Image (cartoon, rainbow, N blue to C red):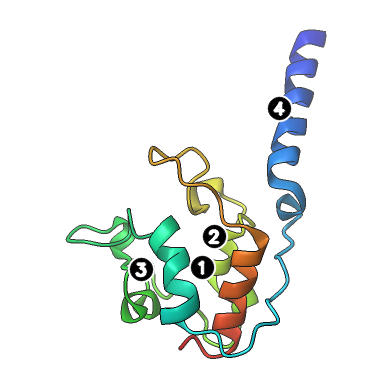
Amino acid sequence: MKITNLIILTVAASFAAVTGARAEGKLPPDSSKAGVTYATDIKPIFDASCVKCHSGDKPKARLHMDTLEGVLKGSKQGKIVVVGDSSNSHLVKSVAHTTPDSDGWMPPVHNKAGIKELTPEQIGLIRAWIDQGAK
């Protein structure tokens, strides 16, 4: 019984260390950068972290993240961006790993491509882009 409790505590501590404040459902703050655009600021983030799975003929969840139109269209479940409201955009919650179901975290924690989770700065830039009109 004591070994089981120790294992549970170790796993919980490891999870908390990896997810930090995000486990509490807190989003990183918006970037203070003005004039954020998809082409200049956001596409490079998506190219590095998202398009490997979300582009081409068979994108996961039918979500194309290689074009502005694809991101704004959304996935088979619906829109992922609420223009002007980053805190209620599924995209932000997903990349910030604040959704309750870790299956929806993007990029997935243990992905075959070895893509690392987005930094708070990258998430803040995505938030600013959405809040500034997602252009």
Q: Quadrant of the N terminus?
A: top right
Measure the alpha-carbon separation of dots 3 and 2: 14 Å
Residue 126 in sight here: yes
Q: Are marks 2 and 1 in contact (CB under 8 Å)?
A: yes
User: Which of the two discs, 3 and 2, sits closer to the camera?
Assistant: 3
**Residue 97 figure quarter:** bottom right
Q: Is residue 1 above or below residue 33?
A: above
Q: Is residue 76 above or below residue 86?
A: above
Instruction: Kindly identify which numbered label has been placed on residue 65.
Output: 3
Amino acid under disc 2: Ser
In the image, residue 51 lies at what x, y percent? 34, 60
Q: Secondary structure at mark 1?
A: helix
Instruction: Kindly identify which numbered label has been placed on residue 94.
Output: 2
- Residue beneath the point at 32% across and 69% down: 66
Which residue lies under the disc numbered 1? Answer: 91
Q: Are marks 3 and 1 in contact (CB under 8 Å)?
A: no
Left or right of 58 in this view: 3: right
Measure the alpha-carbon separation of dots 3 and 1: 11 Å
Amino acid under disc 3: Met
Q: Secondary structure at mark 3?
A: loop
